[in-house]
Image: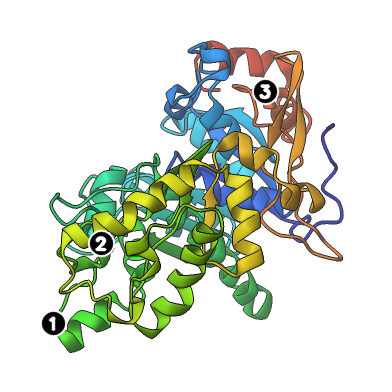
Amino acid sequence: MEEIAKTDNMLSPYRVLDLTDEKGFLCGKILGDTGADVIKIEKPGGDHSRSIGPFYHDEIDPQKSLYWFAFNTSKRGITLDIETAEGQKIFKELLKTADFVIESFAPGYLDKLGLGYSALTKVNPKIILVSITPFGQTGPYKNFKGPDIVVWAMGVEMYQWGDADRPPLRINYPFHCYHHAASEGAVGAMVALYHREMTGEGQHVDVSIQECIAEGLESYGPYWDTMKTIQCYRLFGHRRVHVTWLWHCKDGYVMWLYWGGPFGTRVSAPLVEWMKSEGMADDFLIAFDWTKLDFETVSQEVMNRVEEPTNKFFMSHTKAELLEGALKRRIMLYPVYDSSDILKSEQLAVRNFWVELDHPELGTTITYPGPFAKATRTPPVVSRRAPLIGEHNREIYEKELGILPKKLKTLEKAKII
């Protein structure tokens, strides 16, 4: 797919200066997908996040990071050292035509450079600054470092997961909590833009990654406050026995859980009937009284006898067969898709979810997830692949700022751009 002009999208009139690292990449991508002109600003030589793998064809190269590709689509890219006086001067020139600055530096870093919010408003009074940091701009933790695993743990979310006989677990996905905060940063930017439309005033949006994780705890806080009980997903937090959720099948896994009580009769009995119709339910399972299944009192031996034939049944079918049969019988079972499954998803294909982006530098196209939403009048669009290092330097510096080629070469030699 060729680059798409951003003339009729939701945020087409607006410009974003993106100073984020992996903590805020998704914020700029969301704004870019909705039509804003997002200019990703990297240090000369490229952002450190380009070293994050995996890499295209496993070739470790800052220009081939698939992580960089994924979270920097719909952006243009320039290099600029804002720690230098000349770099700060150029940044302020860019600021004059910008609507948003998004950043994820440690609190106080931009102030030390003379580029904090108060300084930015002197150049552009309507600017909206979005800061995404581990613990926010204030408080006793504001200067704490916040790797993903730290903020995930201190946001309480990690404690909810794991087996009953093991320590808590993190969700094994790189920078998961950062993406929560980056998306909240985009929301904050839009609310601030609405306020600006009403009042003409810009503002500083302060996003704490810890708070973004903690706000997703739903009922956990009130549950503790009222019941003095910590909810967990570790086998529902209280089960004395091992109960299988994730089952092997012929070509992967499916999710299924036996239940007890009146609800268990509606949920568990249909699966046993299906197994019985294929001669795979033994007498013990057929005669089992689901209304009396109580995970507070049931023994591991009983659960093992329930699960043994069930495991054999699942192993005799593929994910597709199990899903089809579950839908017919209204059974709460679903396949666990891997990357190849989701790329072949009929549902996503019908909705034209996947997009192909040209990578001329690689001589190929790459399949990407499509935009986060659809809209009848101004649909978000993944408009271009992620920028190469300094790819749009001349386009922006020469054509937009009017910097002469000779001056540009001097700036490049001095490693200011």
- Distance from label 1 to label 3 (Cα)? 56 Å
Residue linked to disc 2: 235
The kind of secondary structure element at disc 2 is helix
- Distance from label 2 to label 3 (Cα)? 50 Å
Q: Which residue is depicted at the point 78% across and 55% down? A: 12
* Disc 1 residue type (three-letter): Lys
The numbered dot on residue 391 is: 3
Q: Is residue 288 left or right of residue 120?
A: left
The kind of secondary structure element at disc 3 is loop
User: Which image quarter is the N terminus in?
Assistant: top right
Q: Nearer the viewer, residue 393 or 391?
A: 391
Q: Position of residue 282 (x, y in %)?
A: 38, 57
Q: Which residue is depicted at the point 32% across and 63% down? A: 284
**Mark whose residue sits in front, 1 or 3:** 1
Residue linked to disc 1: 228
Furthest toward the bottom, the residue is 226
**Mark whose residue sits in front, 2 or 3:** 2
Can residue 19 be seen by looking at this rendering? Answer: yes
Q: Position of residue 35 (x, y in %)?
A: 75, 52
Q: Is residue 169 left or right of residue 320?
A: left
